[in-house]
Image (cartoon, rainbow, N blue to C red):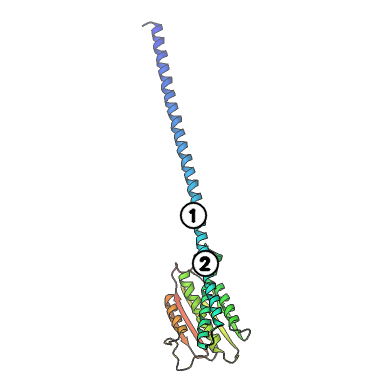
Amino acid sequence: MDMTSTFHILYFALIMLLMTLCVQVCGTIKFRQRKELRIKTLLKDIVSLRDNTKELAMRNEWLITEMHHRVKNNLQILSSLTNAQLSFITDKIGRDALFSSKHRLYALSLVHQRLVNNATASTIEMTCCIKDLVAYLRNEFEAGSRVKFKLDLVPLSLDMSFAIPFELILNELITNSLKYAFPEDRRGNINISLSVAELDNFQLVYADDGVGLPEETAFLSGRSLGRSLIMGLAHQIRGQITVNRSEGLMITIDFKLSRTDNLL
């Protein structure tokens, strides 16, 4: 084989090698381009999903806020209707029943107001609710400085299923004291204590130094609506009630909350 033939063969082999390398390089470039396109598409989908999630979260927050706002407004409408009805009722028993209903509606509205103010929260801080309720009932019964309240409260946040019965229990206890414990403008004191007995165990102590209950009256088996509500609502929060009548009236409610029920 002469030199010319050998040169042609080597030249042809070199051309084939270069073509093979070009094909491999082009394949690699196309693979990288497809990979980059997939990554860009995935990133675009992730951004779109994130934006949709934010939009859904905002819409959900708005719906929750709107729901609690409407409930609060409906409770206020019911309270206004009750006030209007009071102007046409002269019977004492009927008026007392309507007044009690109005106070219960207000206690409910306090819980929903807290949820309206902070729709993203899953719990309600009860200290502020208790203080607002005390201020409202003090004004409703025109207690003024005649009845002094002492509040000793640890921070306690409850979800709505516990916050509502808890608030209603206090409404019944305070209402009972302001109506019956201090007759003839008698002066007195009401103490409300909320403390932590041990981990997830809480104690509510409500005490007044009023005239107390008659000896023949059994609080735990009483047939009044207020006492029945207190017993039923205490059961809802898994509470145990103890009554002490040595000086005025003291009601102790021990209750236990799971981690899903409260947030300290």
Evaluate whether residue 126 shows in this view. Answer: no
CB under 8 Å between discs 1 and 2:
no
Residue 89 visible (yes or no): yes
Q: Which circle's residue, 1 or 2, is located before the other in the chain?
A: 1
Q: Position of residue 4 (x, y in %)?
A: 41, 6
Per the image, the residue denoted by label 1 is 56
In-front residue for pair 125/88: 88
Q: Which residue appears at 42% of the width and 28% of the height? A: 27
Q: Nearer the viewer, mark 1 or mark 2?
A: 2
Image disc number at residue 228: none
Q: Position of residue 244 (x, y in %)?
A: 48, 88
Against 59, residue 129 (above or below) is below
x then y, percent, for residue 239: 43, 78
Q: Residues within 10 Å of mark 2 (few under 14, many from 20)?
A: some
Q: Residue furthest right?
A: 145
- Spot the residue most to the bottom: 215
Q: Residues within 10 Å of mark 1 (few under 14, many from 20)?
A: few
Task: Please tell me which residue is depicted at 55% across the width and 82% down the height of the picture.
Answer: 86
- Looking at the rendered image, the quarter that the N terminus falls into is top left
> Which residue lies at the image location 50% right of the left edge and 56% below the top edge?
57
The type of residue carrying mark 2 is Arg
Amino acid beneath label 1: Leu
Res 70 label: 2
